[in-house]
């Protein structure tokens, strides 16, 4: 085969092999790959992160802050790296950070933590499936013991059960330490399921995932029960401060929120806010997170209130923020540097990272909604989002 991508079965993560693949790509695509082939990464460091390595995608990184966070793990001011090619984005988040800082900071709380694998067991009829569910409840400790033989940091927290026809869906909920944990919980659940199969008669077959774990896609189940970290970021803003920084009143923001709730409902949106995916994606790219998890992580519930003094309470709940400070892309040189900038590289830092991202999202929500009302949305894109194509 003439158009076979070059590979070395002994050691494929070398500059020599990357160069051979770039030469191959130049021949079959007529592109010179001048920028793709310019990088500081050692190809050996990409093992486990990429296959057929040829270079890097260089996304511009901007700095936002200082962002004042009043978390349980993240406390103080942070300068947050954000990787994006959308003009105005960093400037908008920076403006939101100023508002939060002058209000005394964003209060951020991680209220739940769970990563899932959801196998399904199939029986001859619904009664057998029901009886199996009772057995699972009675043998939870033994199942957990089997699952946890595969990991030092993953812990099986509980097993939710759902029935349909002659099937029993089991949603294994784990805590996963500083790792995002999808692969971790997959391996742990496989071992547990094999033990279940060997110790419970009558199972016709099982599938390791019955799609109720909803990897890399949104689900209402995860909005209700959490996948990854469930993060709440909130702030109370005096109306005079909003007017000074944003040029709109708290009352105007509150009324706009009511209108947007209706619009979101009509559209069938999974997010009652403005654009949490922007802040999440930009921080994910910069800090080595699995960007496909934005499909789940961008779901959000925004709530606002106005007290008798005109103070504007605003919060955003992110029910499925899937982040890591260890493993995956977090060890790559650029991404590790970005995590180090906010003190979130390595073990024991994942909830701190979740709190900082939660505060970042809060800043972006307040800034964009204010810009829409003040008429700055279009003009700022004209000024900072100039298109060079």
Image (spheres, rainbow, N blue to C red):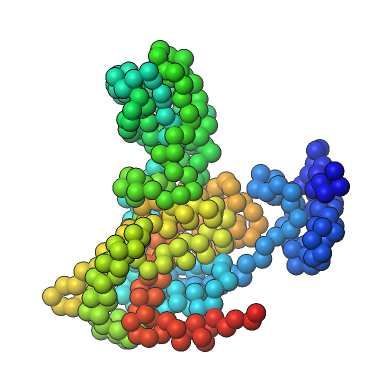
* Side of 289 relative to 244 (left or right): right
Q: Residue at x 55, y 47 (%)?
A: 326
Residue 184 to residue 41: above or below: above
Taking the spot 83% from the left edge, 61% from the top edge, the residue there is 26
Q: Could you say which is closer to the camera, residue 356 or residue 11?
A: 11
Viewer-side residue, 1 vs 55: 1
Residue 205's x, y, as percent?
A: 46, 21
Q: Is residue 120 visible?
A: yes
The residue located at (50%, 34%) in the rendering is 186
Task: Out of 340 and 88, give the one closest to the viewer.
Answer: 88
Report the residue that reaches farthest toward the left.
Answer: 308
Residue 336: percent from left, percent from top:
60, 57
How many badges with numbers are in the image?
0
Residue at 65% across / 48% down in the picture? 49
Q: Is residue 96 above or below residue 301?
A: below
In which image quadrant can residue 10 be found?
top right
Q: Quadrant of the N terminus?
A: top right
On the image, the x and y values in percent for residue 132 come to 33, 20
Answer with the quarter of the image where residue 173 lies. top left
Residue 235 in view here: no
Looking at the image, is 19 positioned above or below residue 179? below
Along the horizontal axis of the image, is 113 left or right of 36? left
Please state the horizontal and vertical placement of residue 228, each as a whole percent of the image.
Answer: 42, 47
Q: Is residue 247 left or right of residue 324?
A: left
The C terminus: image quadrant = bottom right
């Amino acid at each position: 085969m003439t158009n076979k991508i070059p590979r070395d079965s002994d050691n494929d993560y070398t500059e020599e092999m990357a160069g051979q693949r770039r030469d191959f790509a130049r021949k079959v695509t007529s592109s010179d790959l001048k920028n793709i082939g310019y990088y500081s990464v050692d190809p050996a460091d990409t093992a486990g992160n990429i296959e057929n390595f040829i270079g890097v995608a260089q996304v511009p990184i901007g700095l936002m802050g200082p962002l004042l966070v009043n978390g349980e793990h993240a406390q103080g001011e942070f300068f947050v790296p954000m990787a994006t090619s959308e003009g105005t984005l960093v400037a908008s988040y920076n403006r939101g950070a100023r508002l939060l800082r002058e209000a005394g900071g964003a209060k951020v709380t991680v209220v739940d933590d769970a990563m899932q694998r959801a196998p399904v067991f199939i029986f001859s009829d619904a009664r057998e499936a029901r009886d199996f569910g009772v057995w699972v409840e009675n043998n939870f400790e033994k199942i957990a013991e089997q699952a946890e033989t595969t990991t030092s940091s993953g812990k099986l927290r509980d097993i939710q059960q759902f029935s349909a026809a002659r099937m029993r869906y089991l949603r294994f909920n784990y805590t996963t330490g500083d790792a995002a944990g999808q692969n971790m919980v997959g391996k742990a659940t496989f071992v547990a399921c094999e033990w279940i199969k060997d110790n419970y008669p009558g199972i016709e077959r099982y599938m390791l995932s019955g799609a109720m774990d909803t990897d890399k896609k949104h689900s209402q189940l995860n909005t209700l029960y959490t996948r990854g970290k469930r993060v709440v970021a909130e702030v109370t803003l005096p109306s005079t401060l909003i007017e000074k920084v944003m040029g709109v009143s708290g009352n105007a923001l509150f009324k706009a929120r009511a209108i947007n709730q209706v619009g979101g409902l009509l559209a069938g949106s999974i997010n009652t806010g403005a654009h949490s995916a922007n802040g999440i994606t930009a921080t994910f790219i910069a800090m080595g997170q699995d960007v496909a998890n934005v499909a789940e992580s961008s779901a959000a519930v925004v709530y606002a209130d106005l007290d008798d003094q005109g103070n504007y309470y605003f919060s955003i709940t992110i029910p499925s923020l899937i982040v890591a400070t260890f493993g995956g892309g977090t060890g790559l040189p650029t991404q590790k540097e970005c995590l180090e900038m906010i003190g979130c590289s390595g073990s024991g830092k994942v909830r701190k990272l979740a709190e900082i991202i939660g505060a970042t999202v809060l800043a972006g929500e307040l800034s964009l909604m204010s810009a829409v009302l003040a008429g700055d949305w279009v003009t700022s894109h004209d000024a900072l989002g100039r298109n060079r194509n």
